[in-house]
Image (cartoon, helix red, strand yellow):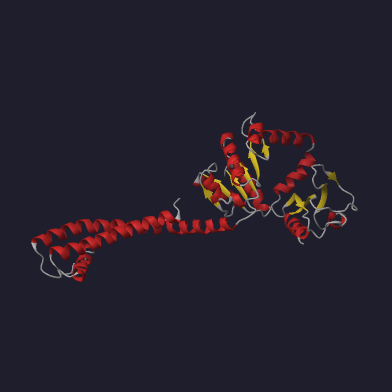
Amino acid sequence: MRSLAQTRDRLLGVVGLLAACLAAGTAGYHFIEGWSLWDSLYMTVITVATVGYGEVHPLSHAGRAFTMLLILGGIGLFTYGFSTIAAIVVEGELSEAFRRRRMEKVIKQLSGHYVVCGAGHTGGVICAELLKTGRPFVVVDLGAQTLAKLGERLGAEFPFVLGDGTDDEVLRRAGVERAAGVFAVLSNDQDNAFVVLSAKGLNPQARVLACQKSLGVRDKLLRSGADGVVDPEFIGGLRLASEMIRPVTVGFLDSMLREKGEHVRFDEVPVPSDSPFVGKPVGEIKGAEGGGPLLVALVPAGSDRYEINPSSQRPVRAGDRLVMIGETEALRTLRARVARS
């Protein structure tokens, strides 16, 4: 996949060759035959264009020899130039290059987004969830075909960077320095560890999660700077056990993820210090009467302890994190209300 700069360089190369051919022909006739520059340029154009016009002035033997060389070389250069331009237009290379330029501008405007390093199966599941819940993201992957397949799976366009997620420059192009989080879901633990190290080095405030591919590497990934490590095999085992012993509960959670129409999710709503809800009772946002997101639990500021189904009279404090369940659009609206100062 060519970038706009590469396509531009190809076009400039073609233009340069054609200009050099015209300049060489003009100079040849000017010095060999002593013609004016205008006559020399005209003779060069009608010669390489093979339009069949007569000679501007009678040619000497040296002039005719030069004309034969110009015909052989010039026609070859012009044929190559026009075929290159036609290929760029017909193959859609130019439109693709402009599309990539527009995408780069979109990425540069993103802030607080998520960078997904790896467009495989796990990365695709992450992107689908981010898309359903309205979170902006950028995908980084080395394979153009892998990115194209991901686009087909998602059924939507998304910003991406074609490159190695372990490379600092590639992460910068994905806007990692402005990102809220990074997912390291490449095909092996070593690459994921490098993604973690690079992402944390470029943006220490970003939350970085890594996918564990092998047993015994969890601690190493955490030491490399990951804020969390997920083992798909472990999660899969727990899911199978839960499916067997508590099918109704698992079915409820499954329905939230698989529902095609409304997207119902558990979500976290942080309470900033300037929120209008600070000091007010939790009951004002609890949603127990229906019709809105429901407060399931509350994590007090500066704590990791969960208060399950907190009392409606409990005051909301700055820094609290509210664990809610509801439709994604309603959750977005509530998050905006809580954050509005």
Instruction: Determine whether, in the image, residue 6 is placed left or right of residue 44.
Output: right
Name the residue: 54% across, 51% down.
Answer: 173
Q: Is residue 94 visible?
A: yes
Q: Is 183 rendered above or below residue 45?
A: above
Which image quadrant is residue 333 in? bottom right
Q: Is residue 82 visible?
A: no
Q: Between 250 and 37, which is closer to the camera in this rendering?
A: 37
Name the residue: 70% across, 55% down.
Answer: 261
Circle count: 0
For this orientation, the residue located farthest to the left is 61
Q: Is 203 rendered above or below residue 16?
A: above
Residue 58: percent from left, percent from top: 10, 68
Residue 308: percent from left, percent from top: 85, 45
Residue 148: percent from left, percent from top: 52, 49
Q: Between 30 and 161, which is closer to the camera in this rendering?
A: 30
Quadrant location, the C terminus: bottom right
Which image quadrant is residue 106 in? bottom right
Residue 63: percent from left, percent from top: 12, 62
Name the residue: 54% across, 41% down.
Answer: 166
Instruction: Determine whether, in the image, residue 294 is placed left or right of residue 196.
Output: right
Q: Is 105 rendered above or below residue 226?
A: below
Instruction: Determine whether, in the image, residue 102 is placed left or right of residue 30.
Output: right
